[in-house]
Image (spheres, coloured by chain):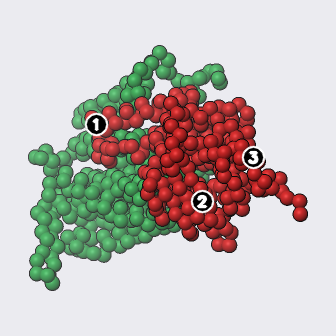
Chain colours: A red, B green
Amino acid sequence: MRAPDTNEIMLQVDGIALAFGGVRALRDVTFNIRRGEIRAIIGPNGAGKTSLLNVVNGFYHPNHGAITFKGRTRARMQPFEAARGGIARTFQNVALFKGMSALDNIMAGRTLKVRRGLLWQMLRYGPALAEEREHRHRVEEIIDFLEIEAIRKVPVGRLPYGLQKRVELGRALAMEPDLLLLDEPMAGMNLEEKEDMSRFIIDVNSHYGTTIALIEHDMAVVMDLSDRVAVLDHGIKIADGTPDEVKKSQAVIEAYLGVAH
Amino acid sequence: MLYREAGQFKTTYAEDMAIFPIRQDRIALAILLGIAFIGVPLLATFHVWPFGSDYLLWAILLPFLILALAAIGTNILVGYCGQISLGSGAFMAIGAYSAYKLATGVHIPFAWLGFAISIPPLPVLASILLGGLMAAGVGILFGIPSLRIKGLYLAVATLAAQFFFDWAFLRIPWFTNYAPSGSVNAPALDFFGLVVRTPVERYLLCLLFVTVMTVLAKNLVRSNLGRQWMAIRDMDIAAELIGIRPLYAKLTAFAVSSFIVGVAGALWAFVYLGSWEPLAFSIDRSLQLLFMVIIGGLGSIMGSFVGAAFILIVPIMLNLVPTELGVPLSTQTITHLEFIIFGSLICYLLIKEPHGFARLISIGKEKLRLWPFPY
């Protein structure tokens, strides 16, 4: 069930500027994400792609500009508030909880859905136990979906890189997010792993109707997966549109291939 | 391994979520609890070997139980939540002195306001639990800096708590009910008419406390809150991005940890020492608890017991074994040997196995499960 491609704007980023001292990571970037689409953000190294994601989920606070998410404009917010609003995120370098099993990592993703407090959890009785089982059930569905049943009890530190990326995606999915930000989900993967991951991304989008924004360097993957592509270079958005439009854009070709002077 | 999980199929998630999913482990635990709750008291009552004298109960089992409880508290903060604390001794002291004040009646005169707060002496059980709550409150207070500072700097902040409370209980006579020597006596251990006097009764009382609180602590660390603590420990940035509030996770860890340590402190004072002075909860105690947690296993409830047993038993063994072998060592040599053994062991474990004996045991189990075939 693919979410209908309405033109409803889920996330609107207006004139964002972000500077670290003298380094201007983002300069007046404006872009939006529509509900239900797969939105790619591409650009050469150091273009500000990750900074843009960090601004969206409250990890960096922009110097200028506004972000409107699901109709609410906000200036400053903390990362856990973004999480509460329904934004989930994976990292370029896997950021899993190394000492915990794959299962516990994904269970931790359910934190926002847990209703019973400290005393109930301590007693682990009645409603608290029922709730824990319910969460386990949901998590097992995700484990099923990502085909990682065999490793659920393995500490994630011992897993190979490709599986760690999958567990991290699982943890993000456990939050049942409206908007999923994927920072280079296929970096460092071989062809088969990339194909698996692409399949999961498409399935998440069509099955759960989750809106996805992803950063990726593999152009073949980007052009196949995404509905719309935004291109950043030196903190400036130089192109935005469908994959075909972006491919033809002179600015993009120059950014990637360089210009003869 | 003498047993493995072959043939035990789990058909529900509830079965898979049990603390001991393997039947043989459950049987072993039941036997252990049977020995602890029925065997030991019976043997000790009739003075059967090895309980010919009260030495084993008084000098080993009682301190083992209470310090294991304190180690669980320390482990929740240091092992599960990753917040290094050198103030466990202070929180034991807060538990002990709060319980003492509550059990003997609190009187705070506000002379300049013209009134006084008076609380009549409370029953012992209520005093011990409220002493724990008081420690939890102070723990939250000293946990607030952890939101800004990490690692070594936090350790120094908790060290400040240690020195401050050492000083306070020694120098402020109000805490000791103006006892001239600075040493105080525990009230009679009266639990709803049942008065605890003999070593066996004291042992059973502590065992009950330890069992109940261990179960509650284990439930917490395997629930969502425990996962929040571990998430903060392993990767605080990612934890925040999945919706964990660092404020809530860290302060609950401080509160729960301090509560357990505070109750252990009250038990240590009331049940084990009987009469004590602030020296009983000095920085040495904090370090001892930290060693127990590191040696036993950071982030493991069972490790807290293993660590407590190890730290208590090594000095006794050093005392007994050479004497039995006919080469008695001087007390000084034994103390030095103790330092050498603990020091080198901590260095070794920190480098080789930061998760301590508990992890070594589980690795051993995993290897033995496949033994004699490596795959």
Q: Estimate the x, y position of residue A75 in percent, counting from the top left.
A: 48, 65
Residue B188 against residue B299 in the figure, above or below: below
Q: Left or right: where does residue A224 sit relative to residue A146? A: right
Pointer 1 chain: A
> Which mark's residue is nearer the viewer, 2 or 1?
2
Name the amino acid, label 3: Lys
| Callout 3: SS | helix
Where residue B212 appears, x then y in whole percent?
29, 41
Q: Are marks 2 and 3 on the same chain?
A: yes
Q: Earlier in the sequence, mark 1 or mark 3?
A: 1
Spatial distance from mark 1 to mark 3, Cα to Cα? 55 Å
Identify the residue position indicated by label 3 in the image.
A247
SS state under label 2: strand
Residue sitting nearer the eye, B122 or B80: B80
Left or right of residue B341: residue B288: left
B284 over A206 or under it: above or below: below
Residue lying at the far right in this picture: please name it: A261
Residue lying farthest bottom? B112
Residue at 48% across, 54% down = A69
Please tell me how crowded label 2 is: few (under 14), some (14-19), or many (20+) other residues with Cα within 10 Å. some
Q: Nearer the viewer, residue B289 or B111?
A: B111
Q: CA distance from mark 2 to mark 3?
A: 20 Å
Mark earlier in primary sequence (2, 3): 2
Q: Which residue has dot 1 on it?
A: A127
Q: Position of residue A176 (x, y in %)?
A: 46, 41
Please state, as top left, top right, bottom left or bottom right, where the C terminus of chain B lies in the image: top right
Q: Which residue is mark 2?
A: A30
Q: Chain of mark 2?
A: A
Measuring from the top left, give residue B262's x and y in whole percent.
Answer: 31, 56
- In this view of the protein, can residue B162 be seen by the observer? no
